[in-house]
């Protein structure tokens, strides 16, 4: 018998059912997006068998791919709709950007580590996710060339909400990001830009993320 590549479909379906739907993520378009993206393709071969575990995993450049549930929670909180333009700051492996791209019209993923930019771009190409652009740079400054965005999500914990994100956010758009000291439990927040330009801020609970390093974030030690 000829050996074939491992089929992860059953594991992916079980992840969506147990980790997402049973924990209260019920929006069909979010669940379908997770069913469409092969998470095993976003981690190194040595971790592929762990790709559907209920936890983050190590990726290149000493970084992590976030726990699927947290990615889903952030997408739900950001209220991403079909046709939206989304900025994902800290695109890392490219997994969250890929999932968002199955809902939104356009995703710009921005990442400061060159190695991760290269691997994520290769994955988007191989998987045919041609509505995702991976940009290299300091995401705390947003991406003015591609603004405005209906939603901005950050996969790294900042010291505050960067001003450029508020400037680049559409009216009624949402920012979902962790805020707080590196190495501690941080607060996941949702910031909504009201039509009069003021903002509404909600706390969504405790999370743990790597630091958001940049001009409007923490300084690199
Ligand atoms: N969304 C990613 C995924 O699906 O794999 C998670 C990546 S990891 C939790 C967070 C990433 O944020 C790291 O790759 C890190 O290099 C990146 N990062 C930290 N500060 C950044 C900044 N100012 N601009 C862009 N990326 C940043």
Image (tube, rainbow, N blue to C red):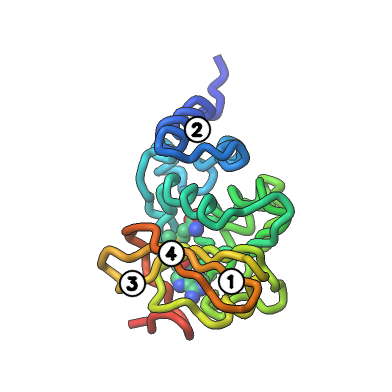
**CB at disc 2 and ligand 1 closer than 8 Å:** no
Q: Residues within 10 Å of mark 1 (few under 14, many from 20)?
A: some
- Nearest to the eye among marks 3 and 4: give it: 4
Q: Using the numbered discs, state the Cα–Cα distance from disc 4 to disc 2 in whole angstroms.
A: 31 Å
* Outermost residue toward the top in this view: 1
What residue does disc 3 label? 180
Q: Is residue 5 left or right of residue 70?
A: right
- In the rendered structure, are the residues bearing label 4 and label 2 in contact, judged by CB atoms less than 8 Å apart? no
Residue 213 locus on image (x, y percent): 43, 77
Query: At 49% across and 47% down in the image, what residue appears?
Result: 72
| Position of 19 relative to 94 (above/below) | above
**What residue is at 67 percent from the left and 79 percent from the top?**
144
In the picture of the structure, the residue carrying the numbered disc 2 is: 12
Tell me the quadrant of the picture where the C terminus can be found.
bottom left
Residue 134 visible (yes or no): no
First in residue order: circle 4 vs circle 1:
1
Q: Going 52% across and 48% down the picture, which residue do you hit?
A: 42
Camera sees residue 12: yes
Q: CA distance from mark 3 to mark 1?
A: 21 Å
Cα separation between marks 4 and 1: 12 Å
Which structural element holds mark 3? loop
Which mark identifies residue 202?
4
Q: Is residue 36 rendered to the left or right of residue 113?
A: right
Q: Position of residue 27 (x, y in %)?
A: 56, 40
């Amino acid at each position: 018998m000829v050996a074939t590549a491992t089929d992860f479909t059953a594991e992916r379906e079980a992840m969506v059912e147990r980790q997402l739907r049973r924990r209260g993520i019920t929006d069909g378009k979010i669940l379908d997006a997770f069913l469409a993206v092969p998470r095993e393709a976003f981690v190194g071969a040595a971790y592929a068998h762990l790709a559907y575990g209920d936890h983050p995993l190590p990726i290149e450049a000493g970084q992590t791919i976030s726990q699927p549930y947290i990615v889903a929670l952030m997408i739900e909180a950001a209220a991403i709709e079909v046709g939206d333009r989304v900025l994902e700051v800290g695109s890392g492996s490219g997994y969250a950007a890929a999932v968002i791209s199955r809902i939104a019209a356009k995703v710009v993923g921005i990442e400061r580590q060159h190695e991760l930019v290269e691997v994520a771009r290769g994955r988007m190409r191989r998987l045919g996710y041609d509505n995702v652009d991976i940009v290299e740079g300091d995401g705390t400054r947003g991406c003015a060339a591609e603004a405005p965005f209906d939603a901005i999500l950050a996969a790294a914990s900042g010291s505050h909400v960067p001003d450029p994100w508020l400037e680049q956010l559409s009216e009624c758009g949402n920012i979902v990001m962790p805020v707080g000291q590196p190495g501690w439990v941080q607060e996941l927040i949702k910031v909504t830009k009201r039509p009069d330009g003021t903002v509404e801020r909600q706390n969504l609970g405790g999370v743990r993320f790597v630091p958001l390093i940049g001009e409007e974030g923490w300084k690199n030690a």
